[in-house]
Amino acid sequence: MYIEYAYQQNDFMVRNNFCGEQELLMNCYRKINIPNIDFYTSWCKYTTKDYYNGTMVGNLVFDFDSDNLKDVQNDCRRLWTWLRSIDIYNGVYCYFSGAKGFHLEIDYQLFNTEPLYNLSDIYKLLAHNMIRGLNLTTADTKIYEKRRLWRYPNTINSKTGLYCIQISWEQLQGSIEYILELAKSSQVTGFSTKLTLSKVLCKWFNLIRYQVVSNIYRGVVLDNNYSTIPCIEKILDVDIPKGKRNNMGFLVAIALKGMGMTKEKVLEILLNWLNKSDEKKMCETITYSVFSREYSLACKDTMLRDFCDKNNCDMIKKLKEIKLN
């Protein structure tokens, strides 16, 4: 797994540096050897240095930011209080940014340990639901991107001279003045190593995944229990007329990518499916395009209607359990 780290030097962000272990990040920070430098890391871990073509795993993150630190603190408390109300006392990490924000992370081991391609999309919709339900008015909903960076704990915020520090539940109950005083020096950090899956968070996470699958939000993500989509399976069993191969191949590639397949595997399937040497260039172009940006697969696409099998589609059955707000 890879963790990206970056630092800001003379108003320029130096990115695309990678570290293999969380425990080694502080060593990377020290090696830069520039006093009071702003140091950031990716919020997730990647299975490849190619962000957009690989899968990722990481904590569910929340960023609370406002000129009124008391409002930010109250929102952070509200979310953490709700987590405690569903018996989550471990695996929650809170940080003061060293400026005007608080960060809160929910350990992914509480609900999902499988690297996923569209994890940022799933987290965005999951966070939106939680933010709306708890009325977290200072939460920043723009952070759910694959390449979003996160200020690393116990490094200095150059604008204020204060440290980004991890704070406990008890410390969060203190005054803003108390927390600012703590941030004048580095603090002890701690993470939970053995966590039990939360039934509530697992249920929420899995329901949101199916919303993403169905394009109610965006993107296509399947888990190991749903390793195919019935309509796509049918398409791969028929010979598509030449005039429709490009568009149909594009839809198939989007679905296969969303199911977590690599670029090489998608290309292999397309080539075997069309089984025509003169279509190799088209397959390569389709695969390159699909893996170069984000696409979503709409169930209502007119080209998929003739292949739809609602009665045997486990995704559609599961989606009936979801009630959109």
Image (cartoon, grey):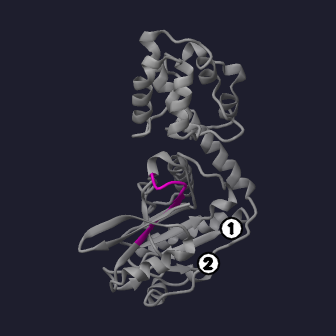
At 42% from the left and 83% from the top, the residue drawn is 30
Mark 1 burial class by Cα count in 10 Å: few <14, some 14-19, many 20+: few
Q: What residue sits right under mark 1 in the picture?
A: 84
Q: Position of residue 52 (x, y in %)?
A: 45, 47
Q: What residue sits right under mark 2 in the picture?
A: 169
Mark 2 burial class by Cα count in 10 Å: few <14, some 14-19, many 20+: some
Of marks 2 and 1, which one's residue comes earlier in the chain? 1
Residue 123: mark = none
Residue at the far front in the pictured view: 277
Seen in the picture, residue 236 relative to 264 is either above or below; the reply is: above
Residue type highlighted by circle 1:
Arg
Labels 2 & 1 near each other (Cβ < 8 A): yes
Residue type highlighted by circle 2:
Trp
* Label 2 – label 1 distance at C-alpha: 10 Å
Seen in the picture, residue 321 relative to 235 is either above or below; the reply is: below
Q: Nearer the viewer, residue 156 or 173?
A: 156
Q: Nearer the viewer, residue 130 or 215?
A: 215
Q: Position of residue 14 (x, y in %)?
A: 32, 67
In the visual, does 26 lie left or right of 229? left
Q: Secondary structure at mark 1?
A: helix
Placement of the N terminus among the 4 image quadrants = bottom right
Residue 178 visible from this viewpoint: yes
Quadrant in the picture for residue 307: top right
Q: Nearer the viewer, residue 288 or 196?
A: 288
In the visual, does 77 lie left or right of 279? right
Q: Determine if the magenta segment contains residue 48.
A: yes
What's drawn in magenta, residue-wise?
40-50
Q: Position of residue 99 (x, y in %)?
A: 38, 77
At 46% from the left and 19% from the top, the residue drawn is 277
